[in-house]
Image: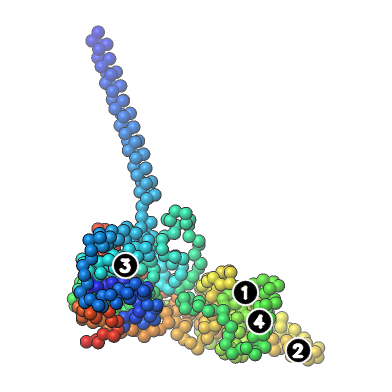
Amino acid sequence: MSLALVVAAAIATQAPAPPAATPAPPEAAPAAPAEEAEGADAEATPAPPSADDAALATHSLHYGDHLFLDGDWYRSISEYRRFLFLVKGTGPDAERAAMAIGEALLRGEQWDAAGRQLDGIAQRAGQLELRHQALFGAGRAYLLDQRPELAKPRFRLLVEDGDASPKLKSEATWLLAWGHFDAGELDEARVYFQAVVDAKGKHADEAKGVLAALDGYSKLESKDPLLAGALALIPGLGHVYLGQWGIALTSATWNGMFIFAAVSAWLAGDWGIATVLTLVELGWYAGGVFGAVAGAYRHNRDAVRNWRDEALASFGASRELPSLHEVSNALPGAVVRFAF
Amino acid sequence: MTRVLVLALVVVTAAAGGARADEETSHARLRKEREAAHERASKAFAPFDGGAKRDVVRQGQKGKKRAAHPMVGDAAKVPGEGPPPPPLRVSPDVPESALLAPNTVGVGLSSSPLLLASLGYQHIFTKLDGPRCAHLPTCSRFGAQAVARHGALGIVMTLDRLIQPNDSSALRHLPEVEGYGMVRVFDPVDDYELWRSERFTGFLLPAAEVPLVLPPLRAHSLASLFTSVAEQPTP
């Protein structure tokens, strides 16, 4: 199982083929893991590392932890990978090193790579706890990567799994609710937020706030595109309805000038200039009407976006990974760090 | 004589007490100084703690809080790096994929006089009076893209675009992105296609859930490690 973690570690940035659950396209095949794989293929059981390798591996692991705690995510990943290479994926710390790579990618905001790394661990895990933690981390990574369609199945699996620890299940319910929220599935989100409130867990107060915000969703101010378009038949009036006073003034002035010029040209009998001015004015006029209708759509969309951003800023802070040193006495990659 | 002795005793006692008080004051001052030095040292040599003290990152603000290179965590705490540059006002509404080629020429316009006019505007007028369009795609490219996609309606879209300020609506600014050497506001043709209702919901674009298939625990033996998980038969 732990040799699998060597491969899982390679998935982070250089996987030859992603797991079935991840739709990300495969990238360039890794050089070192491929050689390692060929070498290991020849011998089914890897030989234990030499004493020198074991000492170097221990050093690499400790230095990786040091770099991690300094926030030097990428160099810590190199050290963890060196460790996994040296111990051939065996030993008590291999799982932690693989999970630490996932956490480093997560904290380095490489969400996609983190998700694939943790997915790889979940696929190959031999213990239920490790699989659950890896799934939770992967879900969190995909949620932060704005891909709720990948995050939701991972959280849902934890929520519906009877063997998952209550704490992990509670956290997964909370983030699953946010996954539905991000996807715009507000009814489903409401169900899970209500479940968080009912469970009276860590996020109950925040969930209450989100439920109150969800109640306010239907009361958002909206503009009628048809009314805006009808008002825009009088240049500028549609934008006044939308509250865009600058555009309204520009549109009224511009259209007024062109209409005045075109009418003057027609009255003066300058047919050529009159035709050109009329065609241009028709363009401006049509553009103004179109702009008013489009503006109403954009106004409604922006009202939802502002509401959504406010809810996220007010209640969504815990969607992020907690502070680096918030979990005391837990080394990077320790399972306790993924569900706090 | 006795009075003198008592007085002397009182004076000596008082002097000793004062010395003790001075000594205590001195010790307290030293302790404070030492603690301040320790605090300074702990700040100077503390781990960078990169990424730990970020503001709330709203969903979708990709690129805003993401460091240019995540190698060193929080650049502000790395000696010599200095504070990070002020972030662009990036909106959650701009997916990274939308910025791959925002200013490409509209396809199918190679012989169109509109494209020629657009190219003439870009290569003559813009060279003369500098960039006047604050948007991305630039206004002429927007016109080319809109006409290529929608024909005459594209002209109407472009005329609407020409009087648009940097606001999406009265409620919200357009997102800022970098483009062609300056900060521009992102306003693609997609946001003018009113019939695509999924773009105007205010939420992420809809995407079908990808089912998750996990093998049973310990399903992968050592021999199976070197074949892709996706190729494994699922139970």
Give the x, y percent position of residue A314. Answer: 38, 67
Q: Position of residue A100 (x, y in %)?
A: 30, 66
Write down the quadrant of residue A105 in the picture: bottom left
Q: Nearer the viewer, mark 4 or mark 1?
A: 4
Count of marks overlaid on the render: 4
Judging from the image, mark 3 belongs to the subunit labelled A
Asked if labels 1 and 3 share a chain, the reply is: no
From the image, tell me which residue sits under label 3: A81
Q: Give the residue drawn at x 26%, y 62%.
A: A53
Residue type (three-letter) at the residue carrying disc 1: Cys
User: For the residues marked 4 and 1, what is the alpha-carbon distance in whole angstroms?
Assistant: 15 Å
Q: Position of residue A41 (x, y in %)?
A: 26, 78
Instruction: Specify whether disc 4 shares its chain with disc 3.
Output: no
Q: For mark 4, name the chain.
A: B
Q: Residue B35 location in percent, x, y? A: 34, 42
Q: Which quadrant of the structure image shows residue A336?
A: bottom left
Where is the C terminus of chain B found, in terms of image quarters?
bottom left
A234 vs A154, nearest the viewer:
A154
Chain at tag 2: A
Instruction: Using the image, determine if residue B132 lies above or below residue A70.
Output: below
Q: Nearer the viewer's eye, disc 2 or disc 4?
A: 4
